[in-house]
Amino acid sequence: MTVLPSAVGIAGTGSHLPHEPIGVETYLAAGLELSPMDNGPLLRPPRWRHHVKPGDRAAELIERAALPMFERLGVDPAAEVDLLLTNVLLPDDLFTGCGADTADRLGIAPESIIDLHNGGCASFPYMLKIAAGLMAAHGARGALIANVQNTAGQIFAQPGNRFKQHSVVAGDGCGVAYLTADASSRLLGVRTRNTPATARDVGMATEDGRHYWESGSGVLDVQFDAAKTKETLDLGNRIVPELVRELAQEHGFAVEDIDVLITNQPNRIFLRNWRTALGIPPERHLDTYDLYGNLYGAAAPVTLHRALTDGRIEPGDLVVTAGFAHAGDFAAAAALRF
């Protein structure tokens, strides 16, 4: 159980979706063939998604999401941001994260910069936990956390990958949140779970079996262990509802009390199964899959920002955000009172 400072919460959110949205018709016109099952209601590709283009850097996406947020809040990030946490699915540089580049673009010099390379689709609640803990320990005034998904336009759009099922559903985007110790919303708690035995069940792979850093001509892709497909699906279906229930029990609320549930958005099947297992009606489980596709770790903050912008979250609402990463090696859930 995470002990959090009494008033740390989200003071503001922002998002950036790069370039114009790409419709599923673009894929169909390019030669994508859908089987009757693929065109069914649960497996149909998302209606829209966005892609980064060559030269787009993760730090640029964060800048475009964060600066309008700070302007709306009337916050000078150079004076108020002491802590910066980022999670980028595909780092632009091999040896460094994007934190320093982001800080330079925002004109800030935080005391701490953390580029979090694990957490995946569950990294948003994980970064909430880390930021709140550091703020409690060191008295930071404000923390910026940022999720970037940038594989759709750089890996999944390549000719050898673009019509694979996981490629067709992916989109790119960035979501950010600004945490303060006096925010009107309050972070109630975060629950995390590691399942290390599944860590090697997904990873970067090439057709010729070489390491990603070795020379060769085969396209780089993300592949799951085909022999463990059932185990991966079973764990993914189970772990998110389990964590939400554990979080509710720890912090004294019932699942029925959740006003808004925000999860990662991998596909329609997981979304349906999670809310069914929790007994949460569709209108309270926010779904941005058809708007943006699978945004991986960025899905939670992007969906949260859209919900706040559209008035889907009202004062007093209990909001839970949850997700699982990769083949299930990490999962997290966080509760906030707005």
Image (spheres, rainbow, N blue to C red):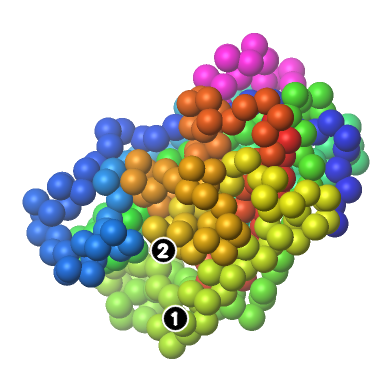
Query: Residue sitting at 66 percent across and 75 percent down?
Result: 196
SS of the residue at dot 1?
helix
Residue 26 placement (x, y as % from top left): 15, 47
Hey, what amino acid is under mark 1?
A: Thr
Query: Residue sitting at 28 percent across and 59 percent down?
Result: 41
Q: Is residue 15 magenta?
A: no
> Viewer-nearest of labels 2 and 1?
2
Characterize the magenta stretch by its predominant secondary structure: helix
Left or right, residue 54 beside residue 103: left
Residue 10 placement (x, y as % from top left): 69, 31
Span colored in magenta: 65-84
Above or below residue 311? Residue 235 is: below
> Residue 229: which disc?
1
SS of the residue at dot 2?
helix
Above or below residue 213? Residue 275 is: above
Above or below residue 337? Residue 116 is: below
Query: Residue sitting at 53 percent across and 25 percent down?
Result: 311
Q: Quadrant of the C terminus?
A: top right
Left or right, residue 140 beside residue 93: right
Report which residue position mark 2 lands on: 269
